[in-house]
Amino acid sequence: MPNDQPLHSEAADFVLRALNQSAQPLNVTKLGKAIPKSALKSKKDLPELLKQLVKAGQIRSHKARSSVYWLPSLEEQASAKILEALSEVPLKQTELKNKLRSLLLGWPPSRRDEMLMRLIKEKRVYKLPPLTGKAKLLSVHAEPMSQDYVKLALRLVVVRLKPLGFTAEQVMDAAREALKPLPAPPVISSPQHDDANLERLILERMLQLNPSAATGAPVQLSELRHALRSEIADKDIFDQAILRLAEQGRVAAHRHDYVGSLSQEERDALVFDGRGNYFIGITLRA
C-alpha cells in the first residue's frame, strides 16, 4: 500500500467503525474480518493502514504477543473501570489485577499495568497503608477512610469465621447489631432555622464519619447521605443543603467525572445540581 494513501479511505472507515463498536481492543485478524474485500486491495495492506492510523493519532496500539488496537476514548473507559473496581473498597495490587482480568478483557496485562501506573501518577489512584501484611492498598481516596478499613476488617472476619461454620450473612447481621447506633433525634426547628440546622448537622456528621475531615480529608456523599437517612430522608433536601454549603464556601464539592459508567441507583446516591453535574464527595474548607 502506498504511504500516501488517504487515512479516510473506505478501509480506514471500516477499521474505525469496528473499533468504535468494540468494548475491548482488537487484533489484526478481527479487524481484517470487519473490512469487506472490496475496501482493501489485499489483507497484506492492513498492517500498513493500521500503522498510518496509529501515526496520525486516530487509533492506539500495544504489542504484547500480537499487536492490538483501540480508539483513544476506550482508554478512558478502561480507566473508569479501574476506578470503579476501587470505589467499593481499597484493594491490594494483586487483588486488583485479578479483577481486571475480567473487567478489561482483550487488554494485554502489561497495558493494564501501564494504565494503573498512569492513574497513580495522575493522583486518581492512591497508595494507602494496608490493614494486614506489607502490601500497600490502592484506593480512589487520597487519605485512609475509616469505613473502608471497617469493610476490609469485616471481610477478613468472614474469612476467618467460615471454618467455624458461620456464614457471611450471620457475620454481617452480628456486626450490624453490635454497631447499631442510637437513633439521633430528628432535626425539627422553626422554619426560619431549618436550613441552618441541616447544614450544621451535615458538618457534624462529616466529622463523626471521618475525624480527618477536619484537616481536609474527603467524605463520600453516598456514605454521608446514608448516615443521615433518619434525619434527612428527602434526597432533594439533602442535595440542596450540600449545594448551599458549597455556594457558601464552607465545603468544596468534588464532581464525578465518569457518571456514564454508573447505574441509576449509584447516580441517585450522589448529589445532583440540576445542571448535569453529579458530586461524589466533599471536603471542609479552612
Image (spheres, rainbow, N blue to C red):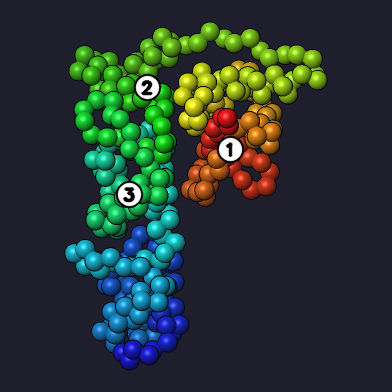
Residue 237, quarter of the rendered image: top right
Q: Which residue is mark 3?
A: 116
Query: Label 1 sits on what residue type?
Result: Ala
Query: Label 3 sits on what residue type?
Result: Leu
Q: Position of residue 249 (x, y in %)?
A: 65, 34
Residue 172, quarter of the rendered image: top left
Q: Which residue is mark 1?
A: 253
Specify which label sits upstream in the sequence, 1 or 3: 3
Q: Position of residue 210 (x, y in %)?
A: 47, 23
Specify which label sits upstream in the sequence, 2 or 1: 2
| Gap in angstroms between the C-alphas marked 3 and 2 | 25 Å
Disc nearest the viewer among 3 and 2 = 3
Q: Is residue 31 left or right of residue 134?
A: right
Mark 3: few, some, or many residues within 10 Å (few <14, many ≥20)?
many
The answer to the question of whether label 2 and label 1 lie on touching residues, with beta carbons closer than 8 A, is no
Q: Nearer the viewer, residue 257 or 269?
A: 257
The residue depicted at 41 percent of the width and 32 percent of the height is 143
Helix or strand or loop: what does disc 1 sit on? strand
Q: Which mark is residue 150?
A: 2
The residue depicted at 42 percent of the width and 72 percent of the height is 58
Query: Label 2 sits on what residue type?
Result: Val
Q: Which mark is residue 7?
A: none
| Gap in angstroms between the C-alphas marked 2 and 1 | 25 Å
Q: Position of residue 197 (x, y in %)?
A: 70, 19
Mark 1: few, some, or many residues within 10 Å (few <14, many ≥20)?
many
| Gap in angstroms between the C-alphas marked 1 and 3 | 25 Å
Is residue 153 visible to the viewer in this orientation of the structure? yes
Q: Position of residue 279 (x, y in %)?
A: 57, 40
Specify which label sits upstream in the sequence, 3 or 2: 3
Mark 2: few, some, or many residues within 10 Å (few <14, many ≥20)?
few
* Position above or below: 83 against 286: below
Report how many numbered discs are placed on residues in the image.
Answer: 3
